[in-house]
């Protein structure tokens, strides 16, 4: 690369060779051009470094920002998912409530309609009964007025009144045919029917004639039939009953109407309340549906954003990594280029005297120029020494101190300039490494933070799940204990029932044996008692054939007692009969005892089978519950295993965090200061290089 630069420099200098030969040595101009070229390359590098630094900062900030956005989007998605589940549950409840309210409103309307119909029927019946009662009262009132005229000396026997009486009879005839008040007795009823059927019998046919029923008072015949008074009394009683019934019906109608109005008010209030509740529920339902739609949309939007951010994060991360690699390559190439320029400058500087002698006539001018250049170099050497010494002191660099000593002792500084360029390249490389390491640290920290948060969230969910399963396990253990206790109780019942059956069977067998022995003994006794009379039947018959003597012969000797023994047959027969009855009773008792024992055996078998069936069901339920408990325990163990794994992951991530922290703490504490110090050091080295290269002439 040095030869190439010299060749290019020679081409650039060729057109102005004569002028340069007169003005200054060719090497000086070449050095100047190379130094300017190197300066421009370094300036370009600085500009590009600034641009890359901005890009690296953008990468760092954008990746951190995107990671934060992804975390927020994940949290939002989880929150919306929980909210969606809650809203779906609320919508189901509100939907059921809305349907029930609709049914309640319909039921209220139907109830109000039924009540109104019933009230209308009651009112129609009341009006009908009222009209009939009022007609009855009117008929009775007219009849009573007509019949009351019978007590006057004119009215009742008057033909006009008789005609009126016959007319009112037609009005009350329907009353007699219909339902009568309770005040009308059977006797009254007969009298009324007689009056309705034959009203003429209740008044005289002519003034001169006397009725068969006429009553004479003080020898003077009355002007009316006495039975009519009784009829009037009955009619007045009926009038009072109908009037009382009408008043009572009016009061009941008023009360019924009042109750109906109160019921209608209650139903209206209930309907308004139900309608308001339905409207509120439907409004709430609409709000919940709107919230569900918004939550679903927000969840879906955040899922889209999360996917987009994931793609952007990966693409940006890859692009930033690629750019970092490209920048590292550019820095390396620029460093090599600057190193080549420094080598060319060093070569030209070291061969300046040889290049000068090649121009013959201009040797004197070149020598003068060289002397002046050496004076300038001495001045520059002193300033370079001071600059390098200051830098060596500031950065405590042994290498810079050596370079400072070399610059003071030597008049040429090509080697030092090359070393400075090399140091600048190293510093640039270190700076890029710091930037790369900072970006890597930030990425690792973000990944570690996200992983820790994910693990923490998973652990919390696992803990809640384990707690729920532990609660279920505790409940199942309680059920198992209860079932075990129930099985023990059932087994105890089976044993007690079996022992009781065994005891009763033993008692039955003993009683059966005792009864059989008693029956056998009684039969033996019957046989023994009957044997005497059976074996001595003829003898006993002969003795029995002699008629007893009831007279006493004084000349005959008295007979000997027991000489003709006939046995105690009557007493023995009674005993045998009693024994036979006892044997029959015992046999009957044995038969009934056997039947009772068979029934008891059948009942015990049924109870035992039922208890065993219960025991089997309890055992089956207990086995199923124990299996469920085993499943829960397996799930708890699996969850605990996962939890342990998650805790291990958390510990590993925590160790990773500490390792990253230990490795990356310098980014927060020293990155900026290192960068600033490195910049100052690079600027100082560039200044020192300029001094050494004669840049302060």
Image (tube, rainbow, N blue to C red):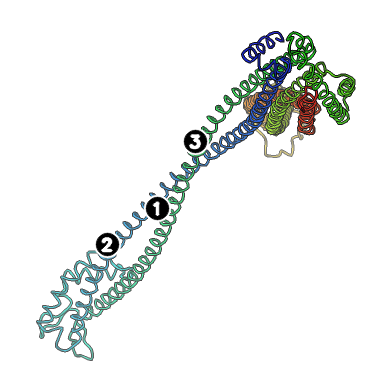
Give the Cα distance between marks 3 and 2: 63 Å
The N terminus appears in which quarter of the rendering?
Answer: top right
The answer to whether the residues at label 3 and label 2 have Cβ atoms under 8 Å apart is no
Measured Cα–Cα span from mark 1 to mark 3: 40 Å
First in sequence: mark 1 or mark 2? Answer: 1
Whether residue 526 is visible, yes or no, is no
Q: Nearer the viewer, residue 568 or 289?
A: 289
Q: Total label count?
A: 3
Is any part of residue 118 visible from this angle? yes
- Horizontal and vertical percent position of residue 287: 47, 45
Quadrant in the picture for residue 230: bottom left
Closest to the camera, between mark 3 and mark 2, is 3
Of the image marks 1 and 3, the number of the one nearer the N terminus: 1
- Residue 108 badge: 1
Coordinates of residue 402 in the picture (x, y in percent): 89, 21
- Image depth: mark 1 or mark 2 in front: 1
> Mark 1–mark 3 contact, CB under 8 Å?
no
What residue is drawn where x is 10% and y is 85%?
Answer: 208
Q: Quadrant of the C terminus?
A: top right
Where is mark 2, residue-wise? 124
Tell me the crowding category of disc 2: few under 14, some 14 to 19, or many 20 or more residues within 10 angstroms, Cα based: few
- The local secondary structure at tag 3 comes to helix
Q: Which mark is residue 297?
A: 3
Say which of marks 1 and 3 sits in front: 3
Task: Answer whether labels 1 and 2 touch (C-beta < 8 Å).
Answer: no
The mark nearer the N terminus, 3 or 2, is: 2
């Amino acid at each position: 690369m040095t030869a190439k630069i010299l060749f290019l420099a020679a081409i650039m200098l060729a057109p102005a060779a004569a002028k340069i030969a007169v003005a200054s040595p060719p090497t000086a101009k070449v050095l100047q051009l190379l130094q300017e070229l190197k300066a421009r390359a370094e300036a370009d590098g600085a500009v590009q470094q600034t641009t890359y630094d901005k890009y690296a900062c953008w990468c760092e900030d954008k990746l951190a920002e995107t990671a934060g956005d992804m975390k927020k989007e994940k949290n939002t998605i989880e929150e919306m998912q929980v909210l969606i589940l809650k809203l779906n549950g609320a919508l189901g409840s509100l939907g059921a409530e809305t349907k029930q309210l609709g049914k309640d409103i319909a039921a209220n309307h139907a109830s109000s309609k039924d009540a109104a119909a019933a009230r209308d029927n009651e009112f129609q019946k009341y009006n009908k009964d009222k009209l009939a009662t009022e007609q009855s009262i009117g008929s009775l009132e007219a009849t009573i007025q007509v019949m009351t005229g019978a007590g006057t000396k004119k009215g009742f026997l008057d033909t006009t009144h008789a005609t009126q009486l016959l007319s009112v009879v037609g009005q009350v005839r329907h009353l007699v045919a219909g339902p009568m008040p309770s005040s009308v007795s059977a006797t009254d009823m007969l009298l009324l029917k007689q009056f309705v059927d034959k009203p003429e019998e209740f008044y005289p046919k002519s003034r001169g004639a006397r009725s068969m029923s006429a009553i004479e008072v003080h020898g003077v015949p009355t002007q009316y039939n006495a039975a009519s008074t009784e009829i009037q009394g009955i009619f007045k009683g009926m009038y009072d009953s109908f009037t009382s019934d009408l008043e009572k019906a009016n009061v009941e109608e008023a009360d019924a109407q009042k109750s109906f109005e109160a019921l209608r008010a209650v139903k209206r209030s209930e309907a308004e309340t139900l309608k308001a509740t339905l409207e509120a529920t439907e409004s709430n339902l609409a709000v919940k549906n709107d919230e569900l739609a918004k939550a679903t949309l927000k969840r879906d939007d955040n899922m889209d954003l999360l996917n987009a951010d994931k793609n952007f994060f990966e693409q940006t991360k890859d692009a930033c990594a690629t750019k970092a690699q490209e920048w590292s390559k550019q820095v390396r190439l620029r460093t090599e280029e600057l190193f080549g320029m420094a080598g060319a400058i060093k070569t030209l500087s070291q061969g300046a005297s040889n290049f000068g002698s090649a121009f013959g006539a201009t040797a004197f001018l070149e020598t003068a120029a060289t002397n002046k250049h050496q004076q300038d170099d001495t001045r520059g050497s002193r300033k370079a020494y001071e600059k390098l010494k200051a830098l060596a002191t500031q950065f405590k660099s042994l290498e810079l101190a050596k370079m400072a000593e070399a610059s003071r002792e030597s008049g040429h500084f090509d080697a030092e300039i090359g070393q400075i360029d090399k140091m600048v390249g190293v510093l640039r490389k270190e700076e890029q490494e710091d930037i790369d390491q900072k970006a890597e640290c930030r990425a690792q920290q973000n990944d570690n933070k996200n992983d820790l948060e994910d693990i923490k969230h998973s652990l919390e969910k696992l803990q809640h799940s384990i707690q729920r399963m532990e609660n279920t396990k505790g409940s199942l253990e309680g059920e198992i204990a209860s079932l075990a206790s129930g099985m023990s109780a059932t087994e105890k019942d089976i044993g007690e029932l079996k022992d009781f059956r065994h005891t009763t069977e033993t008692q039955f067998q003993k009683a059966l044996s005792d009864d059989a022995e008693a029956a056998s003994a009684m039969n033996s006794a019957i046989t023994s008692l009957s044997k005497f009379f059976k074996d001595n039947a003829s003898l006993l018959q002969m003795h029995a054939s002699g008629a007893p003597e009831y007279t006493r012969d004084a000349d005959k000797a008295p007979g000997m007692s027991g000489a003709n023994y006939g046995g105690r047959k009557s007493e023995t027969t009674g005993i045998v009969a009693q024994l036979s009855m006892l044997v029959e009773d015992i046999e009957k008792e044995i038969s009934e005892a056997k039947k009772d024992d068979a029934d008891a055996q059948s009942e015990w078998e049924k109870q035992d089978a039922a208890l065993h069936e219960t025991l089997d069901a309890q055992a089956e339920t207990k086995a199923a519950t124990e299996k469920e408990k085993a499943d829960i325990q397996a799930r708890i163990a699996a969850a605990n295993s996962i939890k342990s794994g998650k805790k291990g992951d958390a510990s590993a991530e925590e160790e990773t965090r500490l390792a990253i922290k230990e490795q990356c703490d310098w980014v927060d504490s020293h990155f900026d200061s290192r960068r600033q110090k490195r910049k100052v050091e690079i600027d100082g080295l560039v200044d020192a290089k300029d001094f050494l290269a004669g840049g302060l002439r």
